[in-house]
Image: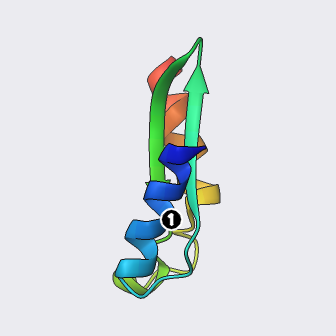
């Protein structure tokens, strides 16, 4: 949870909605991220969308 809060703080510091996400598998962090909607000008770049995507890429 602390890792997700740190990611959320990064979003807040960049003027984004302060949401962070972490994907953990077998006790290891395989992906983490934060909202980058404003920074990248892409409405789908919420951490809820891309963090799981990158986590699943790691599993393949």
Q: Position of residue 37 (x, y in %)?
A: 48, 79
Q: How is the image coloured?
A: rainbow
The answer, for residue 18, to whether it is visible in the render is: yes
Number of numbered discs overlaid on the protein picture: 1
Instruction: Reply above or below: 37 against 9.
Output: below
Residue at 45%, 58% (x, y): give it. 7
Q: Horizontal placement of 27 versus 36: left or right?
A: right
Element class at badge 1: helix
**Which quarter of the image is occupied by the N terminus?**
top right
Instruction: Reply above or below: 60 against 31.
Output: above
Residue at 58%, 67% (x, y): give it. 19
Please name the residue that numbered disc 1 is placed on: 8
Q: Neighbour class for label 1 at 10 Å: few (<14), some, many (≥20)?
A: many
Instruction: Reply above or below: 13 against 8.
Output: below
Residue at 56%, 81% (x, y): give it. 17
List the single residue furthest toward the top.
26
The answer, for residue 60, to whether it is visible in the render is: no
List the single residue furthest toward the front.
2
Q: Quadrant of residue 22?
A: top right
Q: Quadrant of residue 39?
A: bottom left
Residue at 45%, 25% (x, y): give it. 58
Q: Position of residue 60 (x, y in %)?
A: 50, 18
Q: Quadrant of residue 13?
A: bottom left
- 37 and 42: which one is in front? 37
- 17 and 47: which one is in front? 17
Q: Position of residue 48 (x, y in %)?
A: 64, 57
Instruction: Reply above or below: 36 against 4.
Output: below
């Amino acid at each position: 949870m602390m890792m997700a809060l740190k990611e959320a703080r990064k979003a807040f510091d960049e003027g984004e909605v302060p949401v962070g996400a972490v994907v953990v598998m077998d006790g290891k962090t395989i992906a983490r991220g934060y909202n980058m909607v404003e920074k990248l000008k892409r409405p789908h770049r919420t951490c809820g969308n891309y963090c799981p995507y990158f986590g699943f890429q790691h599993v393949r």
